[in-house]
Amino acid sequence: MDIQNFIKPESNIVILTGAGISAESGIQTFRAADGLWENHCVEDVATPEAFIKNPALVQNFYNQRRSAILSANVKPNPAHYALAELEEKWGALNGGEALLITQNIDNLHERAGSRNVIHMHGELLKMFCTNCTLPMQNETAKKYDIQKDIDEHTLCSDCHESGTLRPDIVWFGEIPYHMDVCARALQNCDLFLSIGTSGNVYPAAGFVQEAMLAGALSAEINLEPSANASIFSTGFYGPASQKVPEFIQKLTAPPS
Ligand code: BV8
């Protein structure tokens, strides 16, 4: 199916990205053979309970990932740039909107030029204070930029307590951010494009059904078929750095 042929004027596109789009930039994915979850148990490092039980272990897990994404050899790849170009051009080309939602906590979409990135699972380069924040109010907490390690000595600049700061990450069991924005976009989208995600984590993995129930066409671009590949209208398989620019080039080419 040449999905590009089904796109009419004023079509809204929702793009969901996962760890796979950053793999070729040198950032580990989660569920690959050498993935993050191979060396760590989710329950030990990516839940609020884990943070209460062993804050040093959790901080260390995120400190390592934060310094990894800040290292000189981690840069956006052609897939990130292609999505930034789509965001910039789609309105003038088609009259529709292109909204980027990411499960990723790195800043590669922004570094590639994307200006409106919905980080539904939070951002590794931000933190908030658990002493200043009401319980379960992570999304509305005051956020601070952070590029260095957080540990039990890191002081909150507001309450001046130490040991109360945590990475601004949505852990398992916590409510993803911007779910209202995501729901509205999925209700009004004509094309849902999923890139570099295994389709294992909800509610993100359910977005394709939400979009299709609202009448959208859908495509996944992934190294291999994801857990929910059979739901998509079509799929394009191979490295994102090749397949995403190819797809965006066809989508934005003048009608033949
Ligand atoms: C919640 C931050 C309640 C941490 C992450 C049904 C409905 C709702 C919830 C659930 C449900 N069933 C189960 C749940 C609970 C749970 C869940 O989904 N568990 C799973 C494991 C079964 N969900 C939650 O707890 C969520 N919260 O449900 O709250 C609620 C919900 C809605 C409304 C009200 C209340 C919170 C989930 C968020 C958890 N936090 N991240 C951190 O990063 O450390 S999730 C984590 O997984 C990352 O964010 C990651 O992005 C995400 C998904 O993983 P992927 O991105 O897909 O990465 P993965 O490695 O799996 O796959 C990479 C893919 O890329 C592969 O397919 C590979 O082939 C491909 N690839 C590799 N290289 C390339 C490539 N593709 C192209 N090119 C390449 N070069």
Image (cartoon, rainbow, N blue to C red):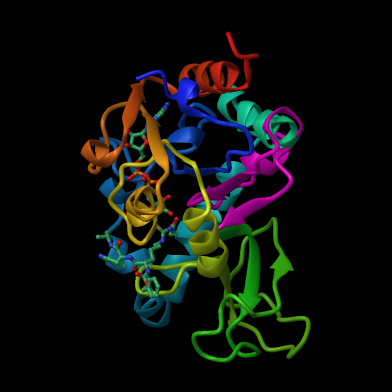
* Picture quadrant of ligand 1: bottom left
Instruction: Please state, as top left, top right, bottom left or bottom right, where the N terminus lies in the image.
Output: top left
Residue 121 visible? The answer is: no
Instruction: Determine the residue positioned at 51% across, 49% down.
Output: 104
Position of residue 52 measured from the top left corner of the image (x, y, whole percent): 41, 82
Instruction: Please state, as top left, top right, bottom left or bottom right, where the C terminus lies in the image.
Output: top right
Instruction: Determine the residue positioned at 52% across, 16% down.
Output: 246
Span shown in magenta: 92-121
Instruction: Determine the residue positioned at 44% across, 42% down.
Output: 19
Query: In this figure, what is the number of numbered marks?
Result: 0
Position of residue 102 relative to residue 1, above or below, is below
Position of residue 190 relative to residue 53, above or below, is above
Position of residue 183 measured from the top left corner of the image (x, y, whole percent): 49, 63
In front here: 137 or 181?
181
State the image quarter where residue 84 is shown. Answer: top right
Instruction: Determine the residue positioned at 48% across, 52% down.
Output: 103
State the image quarter where residue 159 is shown. Answer: bottom right
Asked whether, in this view, residue 239 is left or right of residue 200, the answer is: right
Position of residue 213 measured from the top left corner of the image (x, y, whole percent): 34, 53
Residue 85 visible? The answer is: yes
Tell whether position 172 is magenta. no
Tell whether position 118 is magenta. yes
Asked whether, in this view, residue 176 is left or right of residue 228, the answer is: right
Asked whether, in this view, residue 196 is left or right of residue 180, the answer is: left
Position of residue 114 relative to residue 117, above or below, is above
Position of residue 56 measured from the top left corner of the image (x, y, whole percent): 46, 71
In front here: 95 or 98?
95
State the image quarter where residue 231 is shown. Answer: top left
Quick one: which residue is furthest to the top in this view? 256
In front here: 113 or 126?
113
